[in-house]
Image: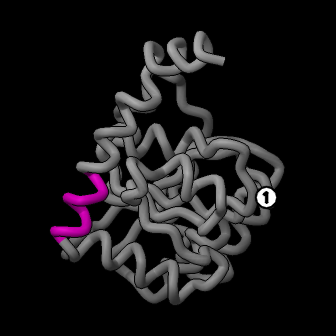
Amino acid sequence: ETGVMLGSAARLHPMKQLDAAIRVLPGRPQWRLALAGQGPDEPRLRQLAAELGVSDRVHFVGEIAPTQVGDFLAALDVFVFPSLAETFGLAAVEAANAGVPVVANDLPVLHEVLALNGEPAAVLVQAADTAALSAAIDRVLTDHDLRQRLQHNAAGLRARYSVDAMVDDYVKI
């Protein structure tokens, strides 16, 4: 197993709990992390990576243009979404739609948004628990059936969140 790329795309803000994604790296020397986005939490996240000795494996990508999101996601093995609070979780949905397995914080809204007919399209876990987050990422990387199931269910999200489906829902409302 050489060079696993984890990634997240979010405003670099404490509420996004991106430090959780950095904390899994010391125990997994073959994992790297790409963080897309900018925000006030960047200095603290850089400091944490330095303290944990993983700065060389944390890549601060900065803002990415909407046209580059697909390329960013295509480079990832797992999308990590440890956010403490979300109204919808668009970044996680986009990643799932792109076929990237998602490991996200266990939030009620994500149970709803990242599921298709009650079947999960992501692995939800207490992201603040480093061992649990690391184990969930590892499971997605090593369990082929789980990965396929997540990708199959995520493919259904594309139809659910398509512009046409949303317009139909607004019309019904």
Q: Main secondary structure of the magenta part?
A: helix
In the rendered view, tell whether residue 49 sits above or below residue 119: below
**Residue toward you, 61 or 114:** 114
Residue 92 showing in the rendered view: yes
Looking at the rendering, in which quadrant would you find the N terminus?
bottom left
- Find disc 1 in the rendering and name its residue: 15
Q: Residue 107 appears at what percent x and percent y? A: 65, 63
Pick out the residue farthest to the front.
172
In the rendered view, tell whether residue 158 sits above or below residue 164: below
Q: Residue at x 78, y 65 (%)?
A: 44
| Callout 1 secondary element | helix
Task: Sort mark 1 into few (<14), some (14-19) or many (20+) by Cα contacts within 10 Å.
Answer: few
Instruction: Determine if the magenta segment contains residue 146.
Output: yes
Magenta-colored span: 144-151
Q: Residue 158 appears at what percent x and percent y? A: 36, 32
Q: Residue at x 60, y 68 (%)?
A: 106
Left or right placement of residue 64 versus residue 97 in this view = right
Looking at the rendering, in which quadrant would you find the C terminus?
top right
